[in-house]
Image (spheres, rainbow, N blue to C red):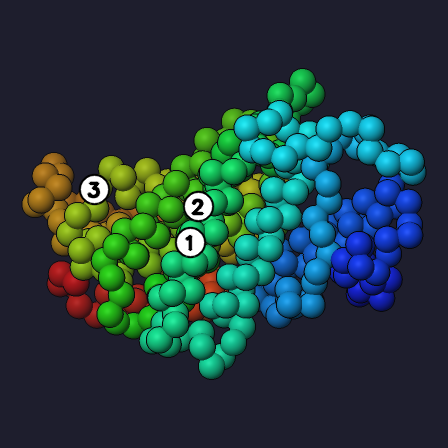
Amino acid sequence: MALRQCIELGYHRSVTRFRSKSDPLRLELQKRAFWCTYGLDCSAAIHLGRPLGLSQSEIDAELPLDVDSANLSKNGISGPLRTAVTEPATDMSLTIHVIRLRCLWARIHTSLYSDIASCSPDHPTYGTRIAHLRAELEAWFTSAPPVRSRSDRVLSIFGSIDWFKMNYHYCILLIYRGQLIKSSGIPDEVFAECLQAAQSICHGYRRQYIGKGINYTWGSLHFLFTAGLTYLHCIWASPVIRETIRYDDMSKTCSDCTMVLVVMAERWTSTAPYRDLFEALSSHTMTMLVKKNHERWQLPGPVAPTPVLSPDHDDLRQWMIAIADTGMSDGMDDLLTGLVGEFPAFEATDTDI
């Protein structure tokens, strides 16, 4: 509704072309209102697998000015504009950088997932689009504004160095997700990069959320669960990953993801299915790899799976239904379905994969 209201008021159009007679303060507030609502719409579309509320081809609104709000008035701008990444950040620098991130999400959504005719990894232009989006991501990450010091109690990781890094790694998962869920022909480099990105997200959330008063959000749950599923998917889908992964790395990553999900479930009961399902999937994955790599890993003896993590398929089905009820994107659904589908094959044959 907020985005629709902004569209009806024309806030998605260029202020210099359509509303140049308004005073500078009003124009800036209109731009801020539009880009805030557009960013929320992009987040909902990415997290829930829904269409964007407004195509970027319909937007020509300028970004807000990178200037401290105290320097804005009806009479104009009384302070300097920030025009280079090396200059000190204003109170709008982080917001503008987040807007650029949401616009990148929108381009990823449109370029790789919205157009049914060209969203297949086999499409002749798919690789070029991936390369362009990856270049945009690198440019976004390297132009991050300086982190401003905060004297108050920190309740969110928003705007911190870890926040920038986790969003960077999450974008990598978004960009390559279409290739990951393809059945064959995926380069080993894609699996390796996505495994590393997913691992970094799990470690980052463990570092930020355990033992601290950081509040969780729906977005943080989506980031973490997507990273955990992607990590497990790369192990199951790539023989090279299974041959090269270290036991201590896998154990720490799965433990970090599980610990944060456990903490979230203690505060928000609706996240319990995410915790239970990831515990079950990670336990089966670790058991599979221990049996396969026991000699190479030089483990002291047979490693039994965690006893509590032996669910039947009814349990898995109920957890998946509960997760779907809370909202889950199509991409996460594809990863989850593929991982759960590995259970019958793993249980039927106690041999190396």
Query: Residue flagged by tag 1: what amino acid is it?
Result: Arg
Where is residue 301? Give x, y as percent: 12, 41
Mark 1 closeness class: few <14, some 14–19, many ≥20 residues within 10 Å: some
> Foreground residue, 75 or 52?
75
The label nearer to you, 2 versus 3, is 2
Where is residue 287? Give x, y as percent: 24, 52
Q: Give the answer, above or below, for where 259 lies relative to 233.
A: above
Q: CA distance from mark 1 to mark 3?
A: 28 Å
Q: Residue at point 80% right, 64% down? A: 7
Q: CA distance from mark 2 to mark 3?
A: 28 Å
Q: CA distance from mark 2 to mark 1?
A: 6 Å
Mark 3 closeness class: few <14, some 14–19, many ≥20 residues within 10 Å: some
> Foreground residue, 65 or 229?
65
> Foreground residue, 124 or 298?
124
Q: Residue at point 43% right, 51% down? A: 135
88 sits to left or right of 136: right
Q: Residue at point 77% right, 61% down? A: 13
Q: Residue at point 80% right, 54% down? A: 16
Where is residue 337? Give x, y as percent: 41, 69
Identify the mark at residue 246; answer none if there is no mark.
3
Q: Quadrant of the N terminus?
A: bottom right
In this figure, which residue is indicated by the disc labeled 1?
Answer: 134
Q: Residue reaching furthest left?
A: 295
In this figure, which residue is indicated by the disc labeled 2?
Answer: 138
Is residue 183 visible to us here?
Answer: yes
User: Which of the 4 image quarters holds residue 125?
Assistant: bottom left
Where is residue 25? Give x, y as percent: 87, 41
Query: Residue flagged by tag 3: what amino acid is it?
Result: Arg
Is residue 347 visible to us here?
Answer: no
Q: Tag 2's secondary structure?
A: helix
Pointer 2 with pointer 1, Cβ within 8 A: yes
